Image: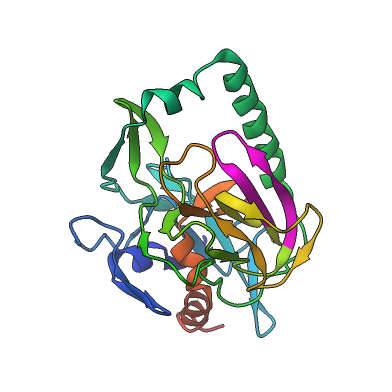
Amino acid sequence: MIEILLFSAVLFSERVDFEDVRRFTFFEDNKKVDSECVMPGGIIISYEKISDFYFSVDGEQFFFLPVPITASGYINGVKVCEPSFPVEEINFRKRLRKRFESPDVYDKIKAEKQLLKEIFSRFSDKMWEGDFILPVKDYKSIRWNFGMRRKINGYLSGYHKGIDISARKGTEVFASNSGVVVLARRFTLEGNLVVIDHGNGVFSIYAHLWKFFVREGDRVKKGELVGLVGSTGRSTAPHLHFGVKVSGVDVHPAIFFNISKIVSETSGLVGK
C-alpha cells in the first residue's frame, strides 16, 4: 500500500506567498478543497516508488507523480479533486485568425506539437537545485490562470497549461532553474519559444518571446538571461507564457516555485 505524504491540494486550497508576488489562490471562489484529494495539475509525493521521478533530501528519496490537468476519478489510489476551472473567452481579430486557419499552417502546428511531445518524453539526470524562480522580475502583473478553460472565438480549445506574466516588450526573461536548452526556435502558436530540460523529467517553457539569446544544447544556470518578453505567435499583447512539465504532464508552476518548502514539509510528515 502506498503511503501518500502530500497532496497538491495543500498548495491550491491555501493562499501561498513566495518572493514579492501577491497572494493568490487556485480557486475562483476561494473555497478550500478536500484534503483527501489531489488537484489536476498537481503532484503526489510518496516514499514508495510510484514513478521514476524523485527528490533527494539528506540522502532520502521522495518520489513524485504528476497528475494530468484532465484527470478524474483516482490516480494511483488517490482521489482526484473536481476542479472548478473558470472559462476564459478570447476573441482574436479576423486577420490574426486567418494566419492560423489554413491547411498548411495546421500541418505545421501538428508537426511542432509532435516535436514537443518527443522532447518532453526525454529523461536526463537532475540538474536543478532548490526552488524555481519567477522568470520575469520587472513584471506588470501575473495571471495565475493555470487550468482555465479557453474559449477562442466561441470554441472551447482546451485548458491553459501555464501562467501568464505581463511585462513590457523587451523585459528580461531568466532561466527559472539550471538545465540544458533543448529547444530555441520560432513556432507558429508559441512564437519564439525556449524549452529548458532540468532533468528528472522536469522542463520549463518560455513562450511568445521577442528575442532569445540561447541556442539548443546550451547549458544555463538559474537566473541566467535567456530572452526578452514579446508577443510573437498567437498572442495579443506582450507577456511571457511560463509553464512546467513533468514527464510530459503539465503541472502548476507554483509547485516548483515552492518545491523546497514542499519537500521539507513532506520529510517531516512521516518518520522513517
Residues 77 and 45: in front is 45
Quadrant the C terminus occupies:
bottom right
Q: Is residue 16 visible?
A: yes
Q: Is residue 3 visible?
A: no
Residue 165 pos. (x, y %): 43, 59
Judge whether residue 15 is colored magenta.
no
Protein image colouring: rainbow
Q: Which residues are magenta?
A: 180-196
- The residue located at (63%, 56%) in the rendering is 203
Where 151 sits versus 52, above or below? Answer: above
- The residue located at (45%, 54%) in the rendering is 239
- The residue located at (36%, 31%) in the rendering is 92
Q: Main secondary structure of the magenta part?
A: strand
Residues 124 and 194: in front is 194
Residue 195 pos. (x, y %): 66, 52
Left/right placement of residue 44 relative to residue 27 reads right
